Image (spheres, rainbow, N blue to C red):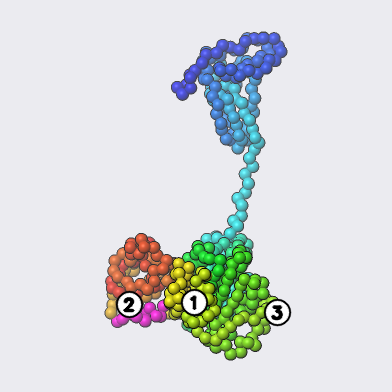
Amino acid sequence: MSSSNTPSSTISPPALSSPVLKPLKLNSAGLGQSTTSKEKPAPVSSKLQAPKLSFSLGGSDNNSSKNTAKPATAKLSTSKLKPPKLNFALGGSKSTSSSKLATPKLNFSLGEMVAKPSLKPTTWSPTTTSLVLVKRELETHDSMSFTFAAADQTLFDFKPGQFVTLAVEIDGKTHYRAYSISSVPQQKQLRLTIKRVPDGLVSNWLADNLTIGDNLSALNIAGQFNSSDCQHKAKLLLVSAGCGITPVMSIAKALLAQDSDADIEFLHCARDKDNVIFHAEMQTLIAQHSNFKVQLLLENSDGFANFSANDNDDNATTNSPALAHQTGMVSKDVIQQLYPDLQDRTIFLCGPVGFMKAVENIAQESDFDMANFFQESFTPAADNKQQDDITSGASTESVMLYVPDFAVEKEVAQGSSLLELLENNGVPIIGACRAGVCGSCKCKVTSGEVKSSSSETLTAAEIEQGFVLACSSTVEGDITVALS
């Protein structure tokens, strides 16, 4: 039987010979035959498909019916193969009649492939695994480090300087807050250092209520302020104030661990000795790394000379060197005095908005190349009042808020925080950092007008399409909002 896809050829029945088995021969008509019997073979079709070379992965599909009279055809195959196997087949036609010769197949089995179980994920995934608190550590009178492990003991993969958003349930309501990471990547523990906030809700609740063994859900780790994406020189100046030291400490430790050639100067500003977060840890790093130097700038340095972090930290090394310090506020003169090679460095900056603006102005006045200047906005919110500074601008004039996807149609005060209005009216928007830096509260204004103080995480295209950061926007007139 011929095939429209394969040329046919005519062959004669295999020749009869002596009972001695002759070598197998391969010719243009198919697999050569040898016979051990003088018995005349049963008639075969006058036409057979020309042999073809096929490659198949998996078991052989042998559906040929049994022949009533078979020539003694050399046949190298197995009748049953367990998938998956690697088969090379000569010939592809299947015998469907007892009077027709089944095309021989040559099968090479490389053995069964055993299915292996999927490998356990190596890095933490917030969508599948919660965080478990394994350690609480007091840093200062109003700041505390919380160390978490993944419930499945996977590693935490992130970029030094980034933050994670926690989902915290308080009185039956879930609140989202972003906290900078103070540990280094690729470890089984994740450390968040959190400072109490006046009238705060989530930060204060964590300090007062979270205990060892408690579980928390979280969102993905994120943040554009990091030492991986921000191209930097070998010489760096890390500048922080208050709890803005958290992401900067992560950057410092990661660089010291990864780059022995890094030249790192660390300037940290605090109110006084009792408000220096990571005092003992900085002493330890100085003792371990000759290329790491710390300078403290204190508003009030009374008693600092006699202060030893070892008194408050069991993990501090016994003979940790004292931290260099001086009294004063950040200024151009101080920066130029401490860092005469400022132009040769990359600056990473984190702290309160006013502090960062002052440092930015100093850099610009010093003709610093701002392409080497990176900063993270860090303004802890009074998170039960939700942006008091924005909300305080609300007037007695009323405007309309429309959120069609959630059946919201509400008269609200002009000048109110858009984030606060959405949260209070049951719209499931996430306000994590509440400072215009994480982008979790991004929403789209389809009509109306808002006044925005930050668009840091938005692209030019998103701004053109009407996207805003709700935490940094106030309502100026009737407005319609969508979450996507």
* Relative to 19, 353 lies left or right: left
| Numbered disc 3: secondary structure | loop
Most distant residue in the front direction: 340
Give the x, y percent position of residue 83.
Answer: 60, 36
Say which label, 1 or 2, has the lower sequence index. Answer: 1
Q: Residue at x 61, y 87 (%)?
A: 304
In the image, which disc is placed on residue 415? Answer: 2
Q: Which residues are magenta?
A: 387-396
Q: Which of the pair 69/241 is nearer the observer?
A: 241
The correct choice, above or below, for 130 with respect to 323 in the image is above
The reply to whether residue 114 is visible in this rendering is yes
The amino acid marked with disc number 1 is Gly
| Circle count | 3
Coordinates of residue 76 in the picture (x, y in percent): 64, 25
> Which label was assigned to residue 319?
3
Q: Is residue 98 visible?
A: no
**Is residue 232 on the magenta stretch?**
no
Q: Amino acid at mark 2?
A: Gly
Q: Earlier in the sequence, mark 3 or mark 2?
A: 3
SS of the residue under disc 1: strand
Along the viewing direction, whichever of 391 and 284 lies nearer the viewer? 284
Q: Helix, strand or loop at disc 2?
A: loop
